[in-house]
């Protein structure tokens, strides 16, 4: 990617993200009352993260077996409500262990 | 303790968490071909995780996908508008005018959550305090990540690319466990994204739009069938 294109992308990303945060903060005084919009916004983060995570996680480490192993470990730890950091670290360690085993055999 | 110091203190755990996430962002950014300063600039100006990772996917394809970039960022980060809206109800009279334009930049999931956890209304000094360290952590962590990217062996780098997904899973699963509506929305979104990955023709749709489509459909279904009565968080 050429530098000019990078700066256009940067400007778009940062600009859109900034305006989304600031405009409601600056403009709105009252509360959202529309139930549909309220509910839609409530579910957005979960829908976004779900779509971003799966199936992309299966291709994340360049090896299906280690990706699946890391995915399973992450799900178990998240189910036990471990912190974000712990879940992420153990997913990485698992993937690394499986990758190293795959390289050895 | 002054409001500013209280904010700084509340920001410390957030900053530590951000260092680790942005570390993987830096790692991934250089692994897909960005320069170190490009990765650092993205983190410093965006201060968001999911949006930046999705932005990388678009950037690696080269220039020209401007509209897709704008739409992707809009949908992924739309949740911030809800947060800044509720935060605007929580601030005292000192947070006005230019202060809103500046502190609004720092509204992230975690900073929002911590700010809303205060018993009293919050001042602009508190907001500046709570935002400062997370910005440094997010930007500094990215710098560490791009540096480590050139030092670590490739098998370690590859393995660490799963970190961000591990974190996403850690965000989704606990609430999905307790709230079946969230669980259903996540499942719908995941199924849709699998369809866009593996069904012929549909798998030509680019990654940014796939996230947008999955999100709009899944969140709409959630909003229609499981409307939220009260603020649940």
Image (cartoon, coloured by chain):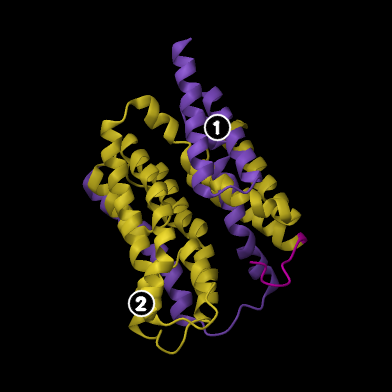
Instruction: State the residue in front, B146 or A2.
Output: B146
For the stretch drawn in magenta, the main secondary structure is loop
Q: Chain of mark 1?
A: A
User: Is residue B141 placed above or below A59 in the rendered structure?
Assistant: below
User: Residue at point 73% right, 56% down?
Assistant: B179
Q: Which chain is yellow?
A: B
User: Of residues A83 and A71, which is closer to you in this image?
Assistant: A83
Left/right placement of residue A100 relative to residue B173 reads left
In the rendered image, the quadrant that contains the N terminus of chain B is: bottom left
Q: Colour of chain A?
A: purple
The extreme top residue here reads: A105
Q: Identify the residue under disc 1.
A: A70
Q: Which residues are magenta?
A: B225-233
Report x, y in % for residue B10: 43, 67
Per the image, label 1 sits on a secondary structure element best described as helix
Same chain assignment for discs 2 and 1: no
* Proximity of marks 2 and 1: CB atoms separated by less than 8 Å: no
Q: Based on the displayed image, in which of its 4 quarters is residue B226 positioned?
A: bottom right
Q: Residue at x 49, y 16 (%)?
A: A102
Query: What x and y, as percent, mark residue B84?
Result: 49, 73
Q: What is the C-alpha distance between the residues marked 2 and 1?
A: 40 Å
- A76 vs A65, nearest the viewer: A76
Task: Tell me if residue A66 comes above or below residue B101 in the rendering.
Answer: above
On whether residue B232 falls in the magenta region, the answer is: yes
Return the residue found at the far bottom: B93
Q: Residues within 10 Å of mark 2 (few under 14, many from 20)?
A: some
Residue B4's disc is 2
Image quadrant occupied by the C terminus of chain B: bottom right
């Amino acid at each position: 990617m050429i530098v000019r294109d990078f700066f256009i992308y940067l400007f778009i990303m940062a600009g859109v993200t900034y305006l989304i945060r600031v405009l409601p903060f600056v403009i709105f005084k009252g509360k959202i009352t529309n139930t549909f919009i309220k509910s839609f916004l409530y579910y957005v983060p979960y829908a976004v993260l779900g779509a971003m995570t799966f199936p992309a996680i299966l291709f994340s480490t360049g090896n299906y077996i280690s990706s699946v192993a890391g995915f399973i470990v992450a799900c178990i730890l998240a189910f036990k409500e471990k912190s974000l950091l712990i879940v992420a670290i153990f997913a990485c360690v698992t993937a690394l262990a499986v990758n190293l085993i795959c390289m050895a055999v | 303790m002054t409001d500013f110091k209280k904010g700084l203190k509340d920001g410390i755990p957030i900053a530590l968490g951000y260092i680790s996430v942005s570390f993987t962002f830096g790692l991934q950014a250089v692994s897909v071909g960005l320069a170190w300063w490009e990765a650092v600039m993205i983190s410093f100006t965006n201060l968001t995780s999911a949006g930046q990772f999705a932005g990388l996917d678009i950037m690696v394809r080269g220039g020209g996908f401007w509209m897709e970039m704008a739409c992707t960022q809009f949908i992924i980060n739309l949740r911030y508008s809800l947060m800044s809206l509720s935060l605007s109800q929580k601030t005292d009279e000192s947070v006005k005018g230019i202060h809103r334009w500046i502190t609004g930049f720092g509204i992230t999931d975690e900073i929002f959550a911590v700010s809303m956890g205060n018993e009293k209304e919050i001042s602009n000094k508190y907001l500046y305090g709570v935002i400062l360290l997370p910005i440094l952590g997010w930007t500094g962590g990215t710098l560490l990540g791009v540096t480590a990217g050139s030092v670590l062996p490739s098998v370690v780098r590859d393995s660490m690319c799963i970190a961000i997904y591990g974190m996403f899973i850690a965000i989704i699963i606990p609430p999905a466990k307790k709230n079946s509506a969230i669980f259903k929305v996540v499942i719908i979104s995941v199924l849709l994204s699998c369809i866009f990955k593996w069904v012929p023709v549909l798998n030509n749709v680019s990654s940014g739009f796939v996230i947008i489509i999955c999100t709009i459909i899944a969140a709409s279904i959630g909003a229609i069938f499981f409307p939220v009565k009260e603020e649940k968080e």
